[in-house]
Amino acid sequence: MVRWKPGAQQRLHAAAMDLYAERGFEQTTAADIAQSVGLTERTFFRYFVDKREVLFAGQEAFQQVFVDGVAAAPEDASALDAVASALQAAASFFPDDRRTHSRRRQAIIVANPSLHERELLKMAWLSAAIAEALRRRGIAEPQATLAAETGVTVFGVSYRQWLAEGEERSLAAIEDDVLREVRALSSSTV
Amino acid sequence: MVRWKPGAQQRLHAAAMDLYAERGFEQTTAADIAQSVGLTERTFFRYFVDKREVLFAGQEAFQQVFVDGVAAAPEDASALDAVASALQAAASFFPDDRRTHSRRRQAIIVANPSLHERELLKMAWLSAAIAEALRRRGIAEPQATLAAETGVTVFGVSYRQWLAEGEERSLAAIEDDVLREVRALSSSTV
């Protein structure tokens, strides 16, 4: 019997990230991950439903930050202003000392089509959650969905830029710029 | 040996749609589909790479309609105007006599998470293709990606509305309304 030490989940997470980066996601088994930190496969599955969950844990918290950001916007905020509030809240979820970790995670996901599909699904869920939060503010459809999708687009473009080599601006600063581009884009008329 | 009759692909396609709708996608095998129209599994795989492809065939043509629509916009069109041109072109891909078929397809996809993920991937590819077409018009990043994503959002919202029960407007008419909402959304300032 392997005795559990404190921090087993953190150690499994770190070991999984190392192995996914070195060998590739497909080539790594749950047993490999567990063994590399002296634990059993069974222990791995006590903390993670499957191998993918190492990369997608914390999704509820991630989503909640956006939802809380929408709720925190001033009462008279427009749909897009409420989304801007959510984007600022989300930026606090990605402080600059997390950038290296996020870059590694992104490289693992980009290298694997099934992980890429999973990431798209995560963004679709995020969009649905933001739209619901906007409807709770009394914003009707299709405005709620359009504003939510716009928010997810701004987040996605900003996040990829934040991860780009050599980029040093904070996510919040990048989001501000991208949101400005979105407003400029759509205010130009035919 | 089963002799091939003309229209094997169409018959396989129709049979697959019927079986997916009746039994569910997971519960239907390629052999079931082929047998129901007197063909062999081997013949099925001559026309379709896998069961999913029945639902996603024609994706290149679908994407090309948007890309051609971007290219066809007047030279001085803004990024969003070029996207509006792509949306109008795409609407011609979905005439009203296709609505019943599209509703059936949508019901099959919504019922199956892996098909839903595949549909999201299709939309992500579409966005990338539109962004590329915009860059060929000299539109820089991040505007190209923002406009492309906005276009895919407008298409998605409009398409779901087009499929809604009781909806009788054409896809082109719905897209016009949704695009107007997008412009209104983003022109409101903080």
Image: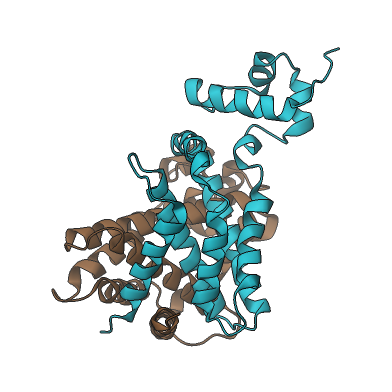
Chain colours: A brown, B cyan
What percent of the width, then of the height, locates residue A47?
A: 42, 45
Q: Residue at x 76, y 17 (%)?
A: B40
Q: Residue at x 82, y 20 (%)?
A: B4
What percent of the width, then of the height, locates residue A36?
A: 59, 51
Q: Splitting the image into 4 quarters, where does residue A59 fall? A: bottom left
For residue A100, say whether it is visible: no
Residue A133 versus residue A185: which sits nearer the camera? A185
Along the horizontal axis of the image, is A107 left or right of B44? left
Quarter of the C terminus of chain B within the rendering: bottom left
What percent of the width, then of the height, locates residue B128?
A: 60, 65
Residue A119 versus residue B180: which sits nearer the camera? B180
Q: Residue at x 51, y 75 (%)?
A: B81
For residue B74, say whether it is visible: yes
Residue A160 versus residue B143: which sits nearer the camera? B143
Residue B54 higher or lower than B129, as above or below:
above
Residue A16 higher or lower than B166, as above or below:
below
What percent of the width, then of the height, locates residue B2?
A: 82, 13
Residue B183 versus residue A83: which sits nearer the camera? B183
**Total marks in image:** 0
Question: Outermost residue toward the left?
Answer: A75
Quarter of the N terminus of chain B within the rendering: top right
Along the horizontal axis of the image, is B17 left or right of A48? right
Along the horizontal axis of the image, is A1 left or right of A130? right
Residue B12 higher or lower than A107, as above or below:
above
Residue B95 higher or lower than B183, as above or below:
above
Q: Splitting the image into 4 quarters, where does residue B10 fall? A: top right
